């Protein structure tokens, strides 16, 4: 797993190659209502039982997959789970949406 710690690079990557990425947001629906980055599919960890069996059908295990949460802890857990379940190109967005909002896109609310 590689940490995606350069938030500015992430912003550029999302602008330049959104179709080349799989984007997963593991935050809860109430968090997503406050702050959201376009293109991320929400797979809340609390709803793991609902989506976990079908994730390999809905996502390509070999395509670059970026995982986001509020600060980077839950997304790190998700990255490890994905790697343990056959995904090969997984990156944690360290600092989460909080860092992205502070460093890349200040229009995204902090919470």
Image: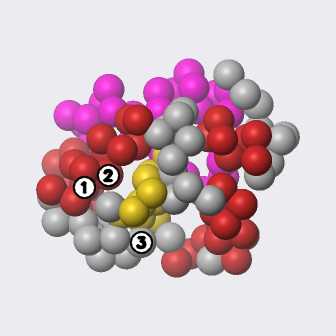
Vertically, is 76 above or below 17? above
Residue topped by disc 1: 82
Residue under the image location 15 percent in, 58 percent down: 85
Asked whether disc 2 touches disc 1, contact meaning CB atoms under 8 Å apart, the reply is yes
- Secondary structure under badge 3? loop
Is 19 a magenta residue? no
Start and end of the magenta stretch?
Answer: 24-51
State the image coordinates of residue 48 (x, y, percent, origin top left). Answer: 26, 35
- Left or right? Give the position of 108 relative to 100: right
Vertically, is 8 above or below 21? above
Coloration of the structure image: secondary structure
State the image coordinates of residue 51 (x, y, percent, origin top left). Answer: 27, 43
Residue under the image location 66 percent in, 56 percent down: 7
- For marks 3 and 2 on the same chain, the one whose residue lies earlier in the sequence: 3
State the image coordinates of residue 4 (x, y, percent, origin top left). Answer: 51, 59
- Secondary structure under badge 2? helix
State the image coordinates of residue 12 (x, y, percent, origin top left). Answer: 72, 69
Q: Quadrant of residue 55?
A: bottom left
Residue topped by disc 2: 79
Residue 26 in view: no
Is 43 a magenta residue? yes
Residue topped by disc 3: 64
- Secondary structure under badge 1? helix
Disc 2 versus disc 1: distance between alpha carbons? 5 Å
- Left or right? Give the position of 99 relative to 25: right
Quadrant holding the C terminus:
top right
Asked whether disc 1 touches disc 3, contact meaning CB atoms under 8 Å apart, the reply is no
Disc 1 versus disc 3: distance between alpha carbons? 12 Å
Q: Which mark is residue 3?
A: none
Disc 3 versus disc 2: distance between alpha carbons? 12 Å
Residue under the image location 56 percent in, 41 percent down: 95
């Amino acid at each position: 797993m590689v940490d995606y710690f350069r938030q500015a690079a992430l912003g550029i990557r999302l602008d330049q190659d959104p179709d080349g990425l799989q984007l997963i947001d593991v935050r809860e629906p109430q968090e997503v209502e406050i702050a959201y980055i376009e293109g991320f599919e929400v797979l809340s960890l609390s709803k793991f039982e609902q989506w976990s069996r079908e994730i390999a059908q809905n996502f390509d295990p070999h395509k670059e997959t970026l995982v986001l949460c509020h600060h980077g802890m839950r997304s790190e857990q998700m990255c490890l789970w994905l790697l343990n379940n056959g995904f090969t190109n997984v990156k944690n967005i360290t600092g989460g949406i909080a860092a992205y909002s502070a460093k890349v896109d200040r229009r995204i609310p902090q919470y």
